[in-house]
Amino acid sequence: MSADQIAPHRESDIAREVALATETRTPLAIEGNGSKRALLRPVQAARTLSTRNLTGITLYRPTELIISARAGTPLPEIEAALAGKGQMLAPEPPDTRALFGADLPATIGGIVATNLSGPRRITAGAIRDHLMGIRFVNGAGEVVRSGGRVLKNVTGLDLCKLLAGSHGTLGVLTEVTLKVLPAAETSASLGIRVPDIATGVKALSAGLGSPYGVTGAALIPAFCGPDGPANHVAFLRLEDFAESVAYRGARLAEALAPYGDLRMLEAEESTALWAAIRDAQPLGAGDAEAIWRVSVRPSAGPGVAAAAQAAGARCLLDWGGGLVWIAGPATEAMHAAVVAVAAAARGAFTLFRAPEPLRAAVAVLPEEPAALAAIGARVKAALDPAGVLNPGRMRAGL
Amino acid sequence: MIALPKPKPEVLARRDEIVAALRAIVPGEGTISEPLRLKPYETDGLTAYRMPPLAVVLPTTTAQVAAVMRYCHQHGIRVVPRGAGTSLSGGALPLEDAVVIGLMRMNRILEVDFEDRLAVVEAGVTNLGITKAVEHEGFFYAPDPSSQLACMIGGNVNMNSGGAHCLKYGVTANNLLGLTFVTPTGEIVQVGGAHLDAAGYDWLGLMTGSEGQLGIVTEVTVRILRGPEGARAMLAAFKGTEIAGQAVDAIIGSGIIPVALEFMDKPCIHACEAFAHAGYPLDAEAMLIIEVEGSEAEQDSLLAKIKEICARFDPISLKVAQTAEESVAIWKGRKGAFGAVGRISPDYLCMDGTIPTGELPGVLKRIGEMSEQYGLKVANVFHAGDGNLHPLIMFDANDPESFRKAEAFGADILKLCVEVGGCLTGEHGVGVEKRDLMGVQFARHELDQQRRIKTAFDPAWLLNPHKVFPLEDAAA
């Protein structure tokens, strides 16, 4: 964190600060509570602009499945309000406090800006899929709206999607509107002991390709599995009304019996398991280790895991095998190995957590082909003409 | 009527030379320039607007699309992409000096992978064609716009198409993994892939729903889903629109998300019943069609829960389908709604706004008042779960005054949608139809922000310059 930090209480003051920064060509680090400050590349800015004081739920209509909140509203506050009405943010954003050693919880603006989604992403969609509207301050200091507070809206270019996952480099989110869904009455999970990761991913694919509405499909390799070092365990989650979960659990168990020994985890155990998977806890990443997320087609997951393990890292597979969390030595050599394996699988990598020297030294996201990179630079300039918003956060020099 | 940008005289003057150059890229039948054969390309689903293009090319490969684009970019020629031409907002309307790039010959399914639950298809594959290619394994492609028999996936991507089942399964944007597109300068770009959440800016999300402003989509990787064990519908009819709205709130509030939740008002019920004889209650002010999925027992249980909720709102009738055939009968009238309205009126405009669902009773009342004021009948169908409202305004196209009134009536409805917190278009797109209303929803500087992003992709404003943005913004 830079020494000079400003945290306005009003959107208009955020707009004024950004306009001033553009006028004076002064780069700004943009953040909420700073809980994911160590994500991606370090930002080169003497001044930090935080949205943490822009707080509060501004609209919540449970029957319209819509919630709006100012960007600095802590995620737990939103989740508590939703839980009070039996609802949830379906993409299940992770709580990364433990991974990043952060004291404060994520803000909703930070969750949208990083487009971080948890296990339910595989069937319910990502945060960006549930983002219905935004207000943001562009580099010129203008307050711009996109989307709205309704569930279906194709009016104009979809800047919600562009801003989601742009890590504060295209605008400062000041308010977001998200679609919410009813939380299921109950949940249960099926754990399958599988002989190897490839068999486990096949079991996950079979579950996701079944008509039983699986909402989580992860694989915990042997090193960190609950059943001892000899077993990889594939987990499939069901969430619905109790009678549906009971019925579907039985059918799913029948269908997946050929893959290995089965065990049913009831609601409490299941909930704890998926919270741990969501937050990548089974990785057991040590403080000095780096963490990568690699996204590939699910059938490529076992190959990515094998290559990472061969390079001296540990893995956790989510999203049916398509998301491989990797923890390993925070070295350029290990990073190069992850980059190579992601490229070979025609997927994408993110250097999710690393000591600052490594994050500053390497590309933390895949390079884009020249034609796209050129468009990207022009789009960045179209939103942030002086390049003052989180410079260098995603890519060096941008 | 909507104004179009002035054609470039230097382009019109070089027509023969341009056609020859295009024919060198897309030979034979793939380049069309004879006036009679251009006729089918002069309009789309919004038939009130017509404009024959300079020429039409029907490429068969992404490389050909890129070569045409490069040529047009080098020579400052405007380009209008076209899929099946089913747009209801004039999304495929040509310009006199534009080359139409039609994607309908790019209709191959390149890959289907059930293990990874995806399909890679060319832009000219129809929406239903994707489902047809995967249904033998029990899979389907979820978004189901009512034109799904004809409309093409490339058009679906550009319009971010929805459908009756998007309350549960989402719209096009939520069901895509990757795209190949050609930039306005003629370069081939791939975004996303076979994996979720590609790192970096969400180009896939920005391209989706961009209405052919940013590039020409040639290949699409879609997610395919395993279908449910079964589905069944019920019908619930009520004495007032407000009561029906309360019933919808109570269903959603109970934690049930039906796979479809359709609302019809009285004029629509009458039109559909006269057409389809589906057994709809003619004394009802509002009717809901509610569909659930799951095993037989799960369907029974959910339908019983919903029936119990509806019973609290003094319904005129509640009819739960006992079989798949009875479900089809319940849907029959709704699915034929547009045809039914077409039978009682020579022409109609199908509008497409979205409102917060709680605003429905007030909005329907205001629409009723406007109907009296304009002297034009209107029937309303509504995707009640997601707030997407489709008023069908009936008019006579042979009477210019009647058309003018219908357009003004439609504009008033869309302004009302924005006024109550909704938007101009839920799934049909802005196109030319709603272009001049963009200022109702967006401030000048917000439109300027979108324009600058368009310019980042299309510096010379050659792609579809007459759509989405009010004309003063186009580099005409």
Image: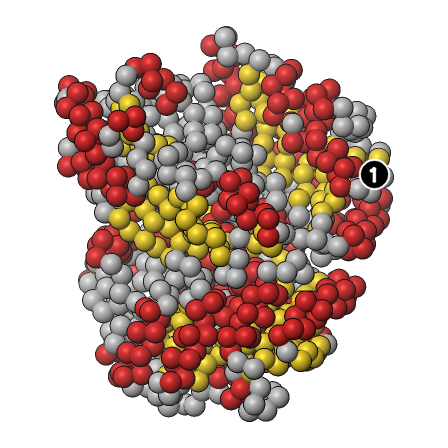
**B302 or B431: nearer the eye?**
B302
Residue B415 seen in the current view: no
* Position above or below: A128 against B399: below
**A120 or A9: nearer the eye?**
A120
Please give the name of the residue rendered at 20% of the width and 67% of the height, measured from the top-left corner: A397
Please give the name of the residue rendered at 49% of the width and 87% of the height, measured from the top-left corner: A284
**B374 or B394: nearer the eye?**
B394
List x then y, in percent, for residue B129. 51, 40
List x then y, in percent, for residue B155. 43, 38
Left or right for B341, reference A174: right
List x then y, in percent, for residue B301. 81, 54
Left or right for B411, reference A378: right
Local crowd at mark 1 within 10 Å, few (<14), some, or many (≥20)?
A: some
Residue B148 seen in the current view: yes
Please give the name of the residue rendered at 34% of the width and 74% of the height, measured from the top-left corner: A341
Quarter where residue A215 is shown: bottom right
Instruction: Identify residue type, mark 1.
Output: Leu
* Position above or below: A138 against B208: below
* Position above or below: B118 against B22: below
**Colouring method of the image:** secondary structure
Left or right for A348, reference A23: right
List x then y, in percent, for residue A340. 30, 74
Quarter where residue A186 is shown: bottom right
Identify the subunit bearing mark 1. B
> Which residue position holds label 1?
B318
Please give the name of the residue rendered at 68% of the width and 36% of the height, measured from the top-left corner: B263
Q: Secondary structure at mark 1?
A: strand
* Position above or below: B69 against A286: above
